[in-house]
DNA sequence: AATAGTATTGACCAATTGGCCAACAAGCAA
DNA sequence: TTGCTTGTTGGCCAATTGGTCAATACTATT
């Protein structure tokens, strides 16, 4: 072959920055969720997005930047998605029940996002050993939950307990539920969520 | 420099297979726990163990084999360590309380092991996308927990509930507790464990 | 058709990866 | 001493990594 063949004149589709970014984010989520963080190299992500490596770097800078961007965006999207379906004016126990159901459903419809988010937040770290996605990023979610619990105590539907412990436990229970439902597709999410809700409420609601 | 300098005659310490293996396992746990799974290359692990890369491969085969070995060994060690401190002849609620305390303490004394185990099990996967550490590896822990709950129901100290849901929730609560204590060293583990125990027992114990 | 501006590529880079293996060192037995 | 076995190294490999950049292809405007 001569050293300078005529370029193969590949077909190129131009999308514009906005849509390309979204496309790459999506590809990142999928690669991470389906094949794990380790497997998610820039080359692999670019390939999944049907785009060259160079473009990924061009739009997102370093790989860490890409991951951080994807994680933060996904976290916000999931949070909004969950909050959207809630009627916060109702009594707190009802809100909790609804939130649990909503979370269980989200775990099904947005399994990819959940899995990817999990892995990124666990693996992505800064220059030293410090995790790059700190509690601060989850703090908003967290605080909202504590506020809700406190309101329940004030309105008299919830007992007196350590709000922090309950909030942590509650989140842990949700994570466990999502992991379990993820591995057992046969289980009915709503049923599980309701059972869990009764269990938790029995622990924190005022005795009737 | 001549192409064949006399070999620098490095100082070499011989330990014997058994102790070397243990040393390498320890190094693996530490690197993974302190710097993340991604950072834990064979070179880095070998370095942390004060040993050449070749030796790690020699004793453990592939990197995946090493990780799987480390994970399974650590899981078993932690499980035994927890079980050792429990008196299973006591009433189930007491056993649960004790187990929670024990877990909280283990989370402190064996933080490295817990963190590493977590990361390995989340990142290590087989040739395809399938995780290499499946639920089956955790099944033993799991089943013991369900058996305990069922015994509580039979002896009349626990209410009637879905054993599976409670077991999953219970495990999730423990994980959440460990993660929280890990990030908040100021919190007293025993106090947290006791609060959590009351919370959970309020949900599953028979009303007095 | 020429121009300008944006979108996108592919080739290239040094560094690192997991894995392999011939050589060699150390202790033990003869 | 001589060998034999076990432990250990370091150099080497092809493949892949994250990242950069000049060159290009496309679109819109003139």
Image: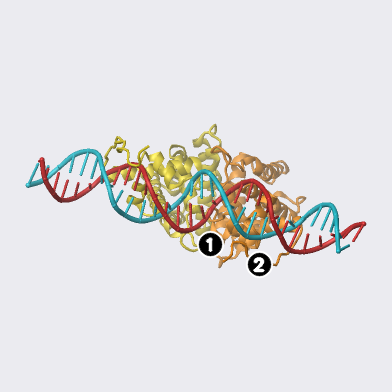
Chain colours: A orange, B yellow, C cyan, D red
Residue B41 seen in this snapshot: yes
Can you give x and y, in whole percent of width and height, for residue A207 in the image? 63, 48
In which quarter of the view is residue A152 placed?
Answer: top right
Horizontal and vertical percent for residue B187?
54, 34
Marker count (numbered) = 2
- The reply to whether the C-beta atoms of the residues labelled 2 and 1 are less than 8 Å apart is no
Point 70% across, 54% down: residue = A82
Q: Secondary structure at mark 2?
A: loop
D8 or A155: nearer the eye?
Answer: D8
Question: Earlier along the polypeptide chain: callout 2 or callout 1?
Answer: 2
Taking the spot 73% from the left edge, 43% from the top edge, the residue there is: A155
Circle 2 packing at 10 Å, graded few (<14), some (14-19), many (20+), is few
A137 displayed left or right of B147 = right
Residue at numbered disc 2: A8
What numbered label is drawn on residue A183? Answer: 1
Q: Is B194 located above or below residue B143 in the figure?
A: above
Image point 69% across, 43% down: which residue? A140
The residue at the far top in this view is B186
Q: Chain of mark 2?
A: A
Q: Are marks 2 and 1 on the same chain?
A: yes
């Amino acid at each position: 072959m001569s050293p300078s063949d005529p370029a193969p004149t590949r077909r190129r589709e131009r999308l514009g920055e906005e849509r390309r970014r979204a496309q790459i984010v999506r590809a990142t989520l999928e690669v991470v969720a389906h094949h794990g963080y380790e497997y998610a190299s820039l080359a692999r992500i670019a390939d999944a997005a049907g785009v060259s490596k160079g473009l990924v770097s061009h739009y997102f800078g370093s790989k860490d930047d890409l991951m951080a961007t994807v994680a933060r965006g996904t976290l916000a999207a999931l949070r909004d998605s969950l909050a959207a379906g809630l009627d916060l004016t109702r009594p707190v126990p009802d809100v909790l029940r609804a939130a649990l159901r909503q979370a269980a459903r989200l775990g099904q419809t947005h399994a990819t996002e959940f899995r990817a988010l999990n892995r990124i937040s666990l693996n992505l770290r800064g220059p030293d050993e410090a995790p790059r996605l700190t509690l601060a990023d989850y703090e908003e979610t967290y605080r909202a939950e504590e506020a809700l619990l406190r309101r329940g105590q004030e309105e008299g539907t919830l007992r007196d307990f350590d709000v922090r412990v309950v909030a942590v436990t509650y989140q842990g229970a949700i994570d466990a539920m999502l992991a379990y439902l993820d591995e057992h597709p046969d289980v009915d999410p709503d049923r599980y969520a309701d059972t869990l809700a009764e269990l938790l409420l029995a622990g924190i609601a005022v005795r009737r």
